[in-house]
Amino acid sequence: MLRFATAGSVDDGKSTLIGRLLFDSKSLFEDQLEALRQSSLKKGLDFVDLSLATDGLKAEREQGITIDVAYRYFTTPERKFIIADTPGHVQYTRNMVTGASTADAMIVLIDARKGVLEQSRRHAYLASLLRVPHLMVCVNKMDLVEYSQTVFETIRSEMELFLHQLDFQSVRFIPISALTGDNVVEPSERMSWYTGNTVLRELHSIEVIGHDSNNPRLPVQVVIRPRPNELDDHRHYSGRLSGGALEVGDKVMVLPSELSSTILRMTVGFEQRSRVEVGESVSIELADEIDVSRGDMIVSDSARMAGTKEIFADICWLHSKPVSAGAKFLFRHSTISVKCILAAFDYRIDVNSGRKEEGVVPSLQMNDIAGAQLRLSQHAFVDKYIEDRTTGSFVLIDEFTNETVAAGMIR
């Protein structure tokens, strides 16, 4: 299974591309197509607007934009896909970060008429920060520039210069027209100068590589206490396993107490298991009666974590109000929330050039990307984001409004 997200500036055709993929791969049911036809007629269109296949909110259909992340699923004989259609508007960048955070690949669309825009660069940079391994740059609306190879090569050269300093395992460039279907599922006869794969063929060829470390991490979400008169009087500690695997009989340590025990039993759903893998939600029973509560971390005794009160991270500021050093927030990491101070900003990223602006950074504006120092009120057990995307990421929450104001990747 491949998870991929679409990104890029507003009106670059992200929703239309996904609609075209669903339509041409015959993944839309007849009743869905009829609903799209009716919606298109209401908008006064003489064609089926495939972008409506992902825009589910009433406001999205009225304004013709994507606001929230829309997830769609489709299957071909070769592969299963989960698509995250993310918004292009600047004020919805937080939703784009959400959609990209679990992706194996990112498709950044660029309008052939407009060329590379700041939001195109920002989304590519965020994909790199989020450790999305594969990037596909689709130059869309080629039908509006007469399928010009010169336009495509100019955009490709400019984007390649920017992407050279970013960290992707693979980068692909494809000229497409999502509206007409050129090079989306079938090769384009009108762009015979392009000899590469179509979008769907490239999606089939991408190798899925695990993002999680081999170190077992189980953030405890729920402690299930035994009911009265139950034969089983052990407590169950439930959560989603991040990284590695656990087996019955493994020695584990509970953090922050550093108390050790052995796994007695494990349950996934109603099934008892001797082994669980990364990504599975599991309930664990320990051989010893030790104090474990929500927010604790169960780790392998041979792969311990160090607690810290000081964190260095790359953050993306998502709120419309600027922030200055010294501001206080809730640091939400895994299943814990602790108070923290944004102590200082080490640098800010110029998304147009990709360079770090070193020196004094007095404040961050919405969608700024910066290196930050955070001081926590108590120890948190974290990993580097490059080693584990789950235990290496966090969000900052405004204590008074409960709004998510920043997303962070721990360095």
Image (tube, rainbow, N blue to C red):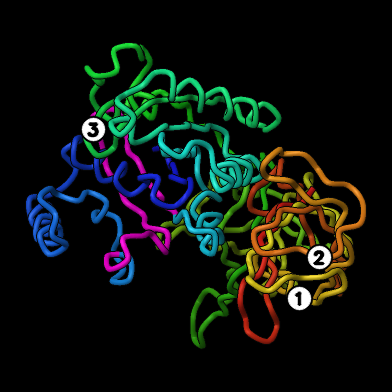
Label 3 to label 2, Cα distance in Å? 44 Å
Residue 71 percent location from the top left of the image: 36, 54
- Residue located farthest toward the right when viewing the structure as drawn: 359
**Which picture quadrant has residue 378?**
bottom right
Q: Nearer the viewer, residue 285 or 386?
A: 386
**Magenta region, residue range:** 61-86
The quadrant the N terminus occupies is: top left
Q: Which residue is mark 2?
A: 363
As drawn, the label of residue 329 is 1
Q: Which residue is mark 3?
A: 181
301 shown above or below 330: above
Count residues near mark 2 (Cα–Cα under 10 Å), then give few for <14, some for 14-19, many for 20+: some
Label 3 to label 1, Cα distance in Å? 47 Å
**Which picture quadrant has residue 44?**
bottom left
Residue 42 percent location from the top left of the image: 12, 64
SS of the residue under disc 3: loop
Q: For marks 1 and 2, give the one nearer the viewer.
A: 2
Residue 190 placement, left or right of 107 = left
